Amino acid sequence: MKTTLEIEFKDSGAAKKALNSLKQETSFRKKSTASMKIRGKTLVIEIEAGTFPAMRATVHSYLRLLNVVFSVINITKKVIQDGHTEGS
């Protein structure tokens, strides 16, 4: 079975940073395969797995990692807007 996740970012630079971050953290792929690419400002993740549990686990892992990516983007944006880091 196959599935595709398409995640749109504000710009292509953010999508590329997300791609690079995800490439560093994808050692969980034991029962599935995934490929990632950038299409404009969209990160495309194509996943293939032999079983539904393997597909579900892989999709869940990518969604968790993407949640971290978006959290970092939001924190970074807030720090830039505030002009300083918390505690300084």
Image (spheres, rainbow, N blue to C red):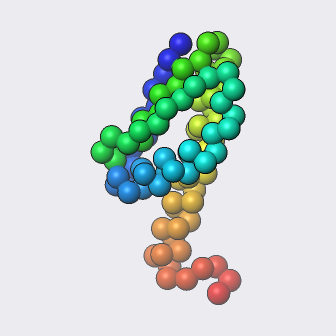
Q: Quadrant of residue 49?
A: top right
What residue is at 51 percent from the left and 60 percent from the top? 73
Camera sees residue 15: yes
**Could you tell me residue 36's position as x and y percent?**
46, 36
Q: Is residue 31 above or below residue 45?
A: above
Q: Residue furthest left?
A: 40
Instruction: Report the side of 16 relative to 70 (left or right).
Output: left
**Could you tell me residue 57's position as x and y percent?**
67, 26
Q: Residue furthest bottom?
A: 88
Number of marks: 0
**Could you tell me residue 53's position as x and y percent?**
68, 17
What residue is at 52 percent from the left and 25 percent from the top? 47
Instruction: Report the side of 41 relative to 57 (left or right).
Output: left
Q: Is residue 71 above or below residue 38?
A: below
Along the line of sight, which residue is nearer the eye, 20 or 58? 20
Q: Is residue 28 above or below residue 82?
A: above
Instruction: Report the side of 56 relative to 13 (left or right).
Output: right
Camera sees residue 67: no
- If the image is split into quadrants, where does the C terminus sit? bottom right
What residue is at 33 percent from the left and 40 percent from the top? 39
**Could you tell me residue 87's position as x and y percent?**
68, 83
Q: Quadrant of residue 65?
A: top right
What residue is at 48 percent from the left and 47 percent from the top? 19
